[in-house]
Amino acid sequence: MRKLLFILLLLSTSAGLRAEDGHQLWLRKQQAVPVKVVSSATNSPVVAMAKQELQQGWRGKAGASVSLTLKKDKAIKYDGFRLIPNGVQATTEAGLLYGVFEMLRRQQTGQAVSEGLLNPSYEHRLLNHWDNPDGSVERGYAGQSIFWRKDNALVTTAEDKTRWQQYARANASVGINGAVINNVNASQLILTPEYLVRVKAIADAFRPYGVKVYLAVKFTSPALLGGLKTSDPLDPAVAAWWQSKTKEIYKLVPDFGGFLVKASSEGQPGPQDYGRTHADGANMLADAVKPYGGMVMWRAFVYSPNDKDRAKQAYNEFVPLDGKFRDNVIIQVKNGPVDFQPREPFSPLFGALKKTSVMPEFQITQEYLGHAIDLVFLSTMWEECLQSDTYQAGTGSTVARCTDGSVYPQKHTAMAGVSNVGLDTNWTGHDFAQANWYAFGRLAWNNSLKSAQIADEWLKLTFYGATAPQSAAPKYAADWNTNFLAPVKQMMLDSRETAVNYSMPLGLHHIMSATRGHYGPGPWWAPPKMRADWTPPYYHQADSTGVGFNRTRTGSNAVSQYHEPLASQLNDPQTCPDEYLLWFHHLPWDFRMKSGHTLWEELGYHYDKGVQQVRQFQKVWDKAQPYVDAERFAVVQYKLRSQSGNAVQWKDACLLYFQQFSHMPLPAAIEPPA
Ligand code: GCW
């Protein structure tokens, strides 16, 4: 009997139960104290969820009550809320739910649940899933799709529903209120009646959490599905097809959010195939969803093989169309002008489109940042972009303010993040990649939040007390703060710069391996006949005279797409920040850096520093062992070891590769100046 008990105990503390630690994300089960919830709102599914969350999570005084009140209040924007003494006030049901999650977050992270008004920065806070109908996920590193699969594709099981609900709950807990549930490289299949039934099932599962469903659509759907001769946006039959398809969707999903479109980009069809503009295409779709309050998010990720500088194309195509879009169209712009690289300057479209709604698109999935192997906290990268000053309407016209309605009177505001979620038990592949999902939601809610606060919250919610039932003891709290929270938070905050150091420092970009799915180095990759703009040498331009892409006034002149004084600052290598130096300049190997190093030495220093930093992360994590359950500790430790190897590969490969052009010896001691 004893033996049996022992085995049971072992089982319950090993794999099965432990995997659940990761599965719960930042929403771990709480020992709640019963609370009385008083609500003036009718008991809709969303309000019911808000009550349930309180009842499951609140740890107040026994017998206390919390009020949830729907009330007119002009100061409350969108689905924002007010925390009032022992309660939440909002103008929408979703606002009540977000208020409850805020109260719980504050309580669980040891902050005061004080009064205050909390409005979201953006009206729409969306995840974009690059999930294909066959269940694969483009650039996904956390298993297959949670929405689609190959076999039994259209049967909705109880397990599906539970997963969709858990996913929606996680989104709601950080304020995410929409999801595009299929890839922007869209299949027309998604609009067939069979698939729309599943779309409805997903929308039904999301609804109680205030999360709306959106679809990415293929521009040639009218021809492919409707048998039309063309998909020309100005053809009345095409417009009529979209109208009737939209009607069919809204019948199934009355709160459907709208369409996301990748058109005339990377081989996707679009209006330009018919001699029409992005505005013609977007407006036609916008008119179809308008009667139902729907939106069209039209991506600005466009470039073509003929372009001498890919970084310039989106600006060139979209700026002339400023003001020509319907008011329910938002132009969705990637943070940088090329493609989610470890570091890019902000896209010059931010702030330049003044009469058109613009939304930032960030990539949560780590396509160019180490997949689900490398530990990279992306919040600092997004914060850097959001806080960049575009100067487009004077000093202080940050990307954040140019997109959230503070600078231009945008009709709609939004932010999108390319999701890193898949079927893996821990949802995101790397346990620390959960922090990127969390951070995206928090920044979409409040675009001036600091990454340090976000990391702090996430670590407390995810790990506090994970191995200590006595976590309420003051001694545990003090030890945890010093030995776990402080060093692990610092590791997170340093991790993005570390990845930049060991992969693409000083403004280098797009020099990753093409053959390993963009993991690891590949600056040499340029097979004959390959499109030049898909090969790294197009971007680093290394030769015996130096390295870097000349985007100054003597080069491609991409600098001129930025507003003064930035344009001139970037144009001059003496004033261009080191971080962007080789993005904008082709410089000799012995160029003298601000540090006193030559450019060649500085490159060596950064690559080496990145390697040292990852080694330091390994030490930090080893010391974190007492505070983390065995499974997550071991997996993260193992992944850090791989990351360390990856960093060494990057350093060795890039320095050896570039050395054939620099002809300079490796710096004797790769040390920063004293
Ligand atoms: O980053 C690139 C990716 C493609 C992706 C494309 C895009 C969905 O390599 O996989 O396609 O961007 O954003 O459209």
Image: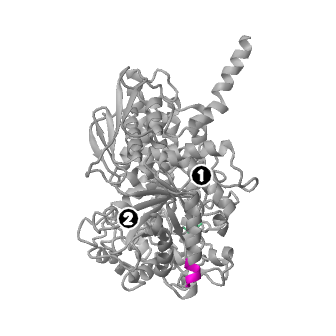
Query: What is the distance, in whole Å, between disc 2 and disc 1 at their CAs?
Result: 25 Å
Q: Please state the horizontal and vertical placement of residue 136, each as a whole percent of the image.
A: 67, 58
Q: Please state the horizontal and vertical placement of residue 562, each as a whole percent of the image.
A: 34, 76
Chain-order first, disc 2 or disc 1: 1
Residue at 69 percent across and 45 percent down: it is: 157
Displayed-image quarter of ligand 1: bottom right
- In the image, 545 versus 170, the foreground residue is 170
- Secondary structure under the numbered disc 1 in the rendered image: helix
Residue at 57 percent across and 73 percent down: it is: 242
Against 252, residue 512 (above or below) is: below
- Residue type beneath disc 1: Ile
Label 1: how many Cα within 10 Å (few below 14, some 14–19, many 20+):
many
Residue indicated by mark 2 = 412
Q: Which mark is residue 202?
A: 1
| Main secondary structure of the magenta stretch | helix
**Labelled pair 2, 1 in contact (Cβ < 8 Å):** no
Q: How is the image coloured?
A: one colour
Label 2: how many Cα within 10 Å (few below 14, some 14–19, many 20+):
many
The boundaries of the magenta stretch are: 235-239
- Residue type beneath disc 2: His
Against 60, residue 169 (above or below) is: below
